[in-house]
Amino acid sequence: MSEQLSTSATQPERRQTTTLPGRDERHEQHEHVEEKLIFNEDEMRRAITRIAHEIIERNAGADNLILIGMLTRGAPLARRLAARINDLEGANVLVAYLGATAY
């Protein structure tokens, strides 16, 4: 009986590589995704009100409060929360934005 060496033991394993889709291909992939409504307008308003009450409660008021929204989607949320806290407490809440991109 002669021993045979397998080709995988003598040669490096070849792996199939795939390239990431280009910008146009990624865009085309997302065209077929159906949008799903998570909150309607009324539900979103109630959620922001609940979050605003939680912030006020946990901070014992709205004095010296600053909200920081992550760009891009957190910025409008921070603005809406600040407006709602202003409505509830009459406090002028500062809003700042933070970008997560590397410099």
Image (cartoon, grey):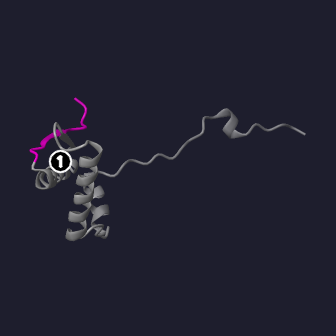
Q: Please, what is the three-letter code of the amino acid marked with disc 1?
A: Ala
Q: Residue at x 27, y 66 (%)?
A: 31
Residue tagged by mark 1? 75
| The one of 70 and 56 positioned closer to us in this rendering | 56
Vertical arrangement, residue 8 with respect to residue 53, above or below: above
In the picture, the quarter occupied by the N terminus is top right
SS at circle 1: helix
Answer with the quarter of the image where residue 45 lies: bottom left
Q: Is residue 43 above or below residue 58?
A: below
Residue at screen point 20% across, 69% down: 41
Q: In the drawing, does residue 93 fall left or right of residue 22?
A: left
Q: Who's the residue at 29% across and 57% down the image?
A: 25
- Residue at far top of view: 103
Q: Residue at x 17, y 39 (%)?
A: 66
Please identify the quarter of the rendering in which residue 101 is found: top left
Residue 75: image x %, image y %?
17, 47
Q: From the top left corner, tell me how far across and down residue 6 is, in percent.
A: 73, 40
| Predominant SS along the magenta part | loop
Q: Is residue 33 left or right of residue 73?
A: right
Residue bounds of the magenta highlight? 91-103
Quick check: is 98 in the magenta stretch? Answer: yes
* Residue 69 left/right relative to 92: right
Q: What quarter of the picture does the C terminus occupy?
A: top left
Q: How many marks?
A: 1
Residue placed most toward the observer, 59 or 35: 59
